[in-house]
Amino acid sequence: MKQNPEQKVNILTEINNKKIVPVYLLCGKETFLIEGTLKQMVEKLLPPDTRDFNLTYLDGNSVSVQDILSNVELYPIMSECRVVVVENFPGFNARTRKTSPLTAIQDAMKLESDDVQKCVSDIAKLLSVSIQQIADGESDYNSAVDEINESLGGRMNEDVSRFFSRLPQLASQHDTITESGSNNGDADLLLEWLEGDLPKTSVLIFIIKDEVNQNNKIAKAIQKVGKYVSFDPLEKGTSLNRDPLYRKVIEKFATYNKKITPRAFEQLRNRTGGDMHTIAEAINKIINYVGDKQQIDETDVRNMVTQTDVDNMFGLTDALGKRSTRLGIKSLREVLASGTSPHLVVGAITSHLRLTLQAKLIAVKKRYKPIGRQMRFENFTQNILQPLSEEMGDILPKTTEYNILKRHPFPVFKIFQSLHTYTMDELLLAIDKTLEVQIQLKTTNVDDGLLLEQLVYDICSGSKSRWK
């Protein structure tokens, strides 16, 4: 359901060519691209002199669907159309909730005997499916369960699996389905509107700054009558000339009549972590710094783009790979001192451990010997990473977040170098521990720093395991 980056450009091209659809959904984690696309859409759809009369921004968390549709049905004033932008509409994305998936499942399981209606309703919201779909055991329900399991690193235990097996029977109870119907009235109203005759003089744009569940009914309905675009972090190209991020950076510097060397670009990517919003801010700093100089080199990037947060986080994960408690605690304190949220830190640790487990499974399957410190990065990329990407690229998850072969090559290299320090069981236990800490950060009054230091200590401590 996700679309490639070229289709994001097509939205603006189509609007230029007067090919305008009545509803758009712009979503994803690359918020800078979302904001930039929305800005250009508004500029193309509404002339400046009448924009204030025909542009409405609504907070999806505080307005009803009826309020949204009432604004959409208004006739434009001295313009061909009006634009209604709705941010954070809760009907799209269960991932915007504060509760983690694991916690939400556990909370629902506790309600099974006391309040079956709320139990089923909460799971339906978590999975972004209807209770009727659960009761019928539809493929959308089963796919949503599989997606949740994947997000938990495939660690859904037997109790949770049995709970999801029982859920269709629980949902088939008449009272539960009736209860759900009233709770989901807003979503049903919006779906009914999307399936009807949509207005010709209004454009409705939904903005979700996060991933949208691919099984979401509203997103599917929008795709039929409008445009659904997911703005994910730009994947690194197979070569520099095919790298979409490189092209965007080149284009941005060209607007200032400047160029950037390939080495300087790689340094810019590494120092910003590839985040588009950070890159845009960095480019502005560099432009102001270099003055009339036309070619941006590595020195310019190094002087103007700090790497404290990226370096510290990489230092933390590298210390975990080495199982160095001293370096791990030191890097953790530096990350927290820089202002990084404890939730982001534990999320980064969890991601690192899951990728390490994935690499471990690949190494066992391919019967790789331990990669020693003597192996050069270039040799690893050419002889191991590239062949693996060609062989297993379609087997692993498609998203960069869950596919180690789509991550930046150097961190992948460091992960493969550290595989001999952990057994499979140790990695699984470490992932379980991070999930426990995520819950504790939200439910206890224990100091966040102490919780994270204990986590780092628990992961790093113990004997250095041999390759298994």
Image (cartoon, helix red, strand yellow):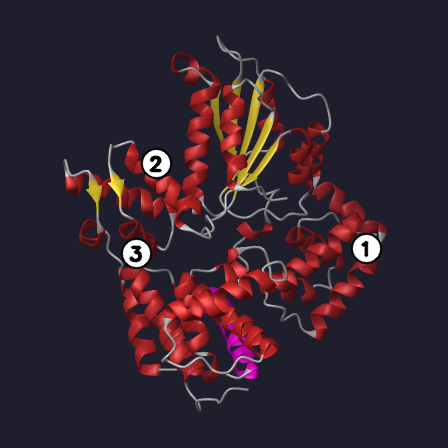
- Within 10 Å of disc 2 (Cα), the crowding (few <14, some 14-19, many 20+) is some
Which segment did they paint magenta? 424-446
Q: Which of marks 1 and 2 is nearer the N terminus?
A: 1
Q: Which of marks 3 and 2 is nearer the N terminus?
A: 2
- Give the alpha-carbon distance from disc 3 to disc 2, as whole Å: 19 Å
Q: What numbered label is drawn on residue 81?
A: none
Q: Nearer the viewer, mark 1 or mark 3?
A: 3
Vertical placement of residue 416 versus 336, above or below = below
- Give the alpha-carbon distance from disc 1 to disc 2, as whole Å: 49 Å
Vertical placement of residue 298 versus 223, above or below = below
Judged from the image, the secondary structure of the residue bearing numbered disc 3 is helix
Q: Residue at x 33, y 47 (%)?
A: 278
Q: Residue at x 73, y 30 (%)?
A: 192
Judged from the image, the secondary structure of the residue bearing numbered disc 1 is loop
Q: What residue type is labelled 1?
A: Gly
Q: Name the residue under label 2.
A: 251
- Within 10 Å of disc 1 (Cα), the crowding (few <14, some 14-19, many 20+) is some
Q: What numbered label is drawn on residue 137?
A: 1
Q: Overall secondary structure of the magenta stretch?
A: helix
